[in-house]
Image: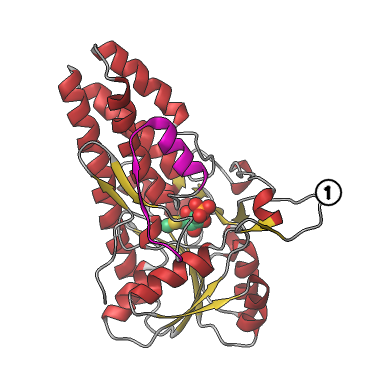
Amino acid sequence: MKRPTPPIEWAGDHIRIIDQTLLPAEVKFIEIRSASQAVDAIQRLAIRGAPALGAFGSLALVVALDEIEPESLSQARTRLEECRTLIGDARPTAINLRWAVDRVIDQATKDGSDLTSLRSALIREAQAVADEDKAACDEIGRLGHELLRDANVIGTHCNAGRLATAGSGTALAPMYAKAQAGEPLRVLASETRPLLQGARLTAWELDDAGIDVTVVPDGAMASTVLSGQVDAYIVGADRIAANGDAANKIGTVGHALAAREAGIPFYVAAPTSTIDFKLASGEQIEIEQRDAVEVHEIQGSRLTPQGVDAFNPAFDVTPHHLITAIITEAGVLRPPFRDSIAEAFKQVGGS
Ligand code: MRU
């Protein structure tokens, strides 16, 4: 397999990211040097995917602090508090962003007794968020590989791979593990309208790694599954409620229904940082509504008649009863999810 390109890099005084909106046509790196550039990159999906948003949001706190050149500790702390909402709420569904921003600010505020130690603590904690995510991806890859050993054709939706995490991905990590083990593997990537994360990003990163990937139109996936051509599904998640209901890219629930009808497993892969234990069920998950222009247009060309409305929810919630198992770094969680999630949460020290 070829060497992967890291989607996020800390360059000492700025963050360097691949602008994912341009992939696969162009691999362009952009430099993030201010809070407003960070928020813009998050909101236009130059950086995306729940765990990657957590890793990026953590580093964005450092550039947001540097940008104002604070003269006192209290000025720096006030700036970080501003960023709790400015950066932490830049996208509402992926809990990893809010979780990481809160974690890094809280830890740095505790450890930073002057401006220098505050900045160092921010960088240290941001690095810990990324390192832990990378380790979580590895463990999810290992556990998912065991579950998917006999699955030769695997369906996925959106992009939950290297581009979406600080490591080898969540849903895609087991695929990398299978490929590394030399097992037969063909991935069906649903295109994921309107922003085409499956067609553009999953296809690009798996192809880059030498993995056989076929892009399937969203509307063709259910019949492909029902005709017996898919052995299992694995997708990522943006937020998982305490009962196992899982929010992920719009369209995911349709794949879960097809999998249930076809009698194939439907796995959700996510680090425990994606679990929002405060929420009893998926009904409480805020679903990001995005600009209708993303539905009206493809790469700047208008598809729909002028004057017609478009509806553009970015995520949907797959009810827990359609999920075979949730693969986390703390183990493979099985129904009843309320119990297995509570146990995993305790194991990783959550409250
Ligand atoms: O809108 P996006 O591209 O950020 O949506 C991403 C997804 O839905 C992913 O499946 C999810 O964040 C998991 S990424 C490991």
Task: Classify 303 as above or below 276.
Answer: below
Q: How is the image coloured?
A: secondary structure
- Label 1 CB, ligand 1: below 8 Å? no
Task: Classify 46 as above or below 106.
Answer: below
Q: Position of residue 255 (x, y in %)?
A: 61, 69
Is residue 237 shown to the viewer in this render?
A: no
- Residue with the mark numbered 1: 307
Q: Position of residue 124 (x, y in %)?
A: 20, 37
Among the 4 quarters of the image, the one containing residue 331: bottom left
Q: Which residues are magenta?
A: 25-44
Under circle 1, the secondary element is loop
Among the 4 quarters of the image, the one containing residue 24: bottom left
Among the 4 quarters of the image, the one containing residue 120: top left
Residue at x-position 33% and y-position 38%? 58
Q: Identify the image quadrant of the C terminus.
A: top left
Task: Classify 42 as above or below 167.
Answer: above
Left or right for 141, reference 171: left
Residue at x-position 44% and y-position 56%? 20
Q: Position of residue 298 (x, y in %)?
A: 63, 60
Q: Is residue 235 magenta?
A: no
Is residue 128 shown to the viewer in this render?
A: yes
Residue at x-position 39% and y-position 21%? 81
Q: Position of residue 79 (x, y in %)?
A: 36, 20
Front residue (pair 99, 213): 213
Q: Check disc 1 and give the amino acid type.
A: Gly
Q: Identify the image quadrant of the N terminus.
A: bottom left
Q: In the rendered picture of this protein, how many numbered marks are placed on residues?
A: 1
Left or right for 229, reference 75: right
Residue at x-position 65% and y-position 69%? 257
How many residues crowd mark 1 within 10 Å: few (<14), some (14–19), many (20+)?
few
Left or right for 213, reference 66: right
Left or right for 23, reference 191: left
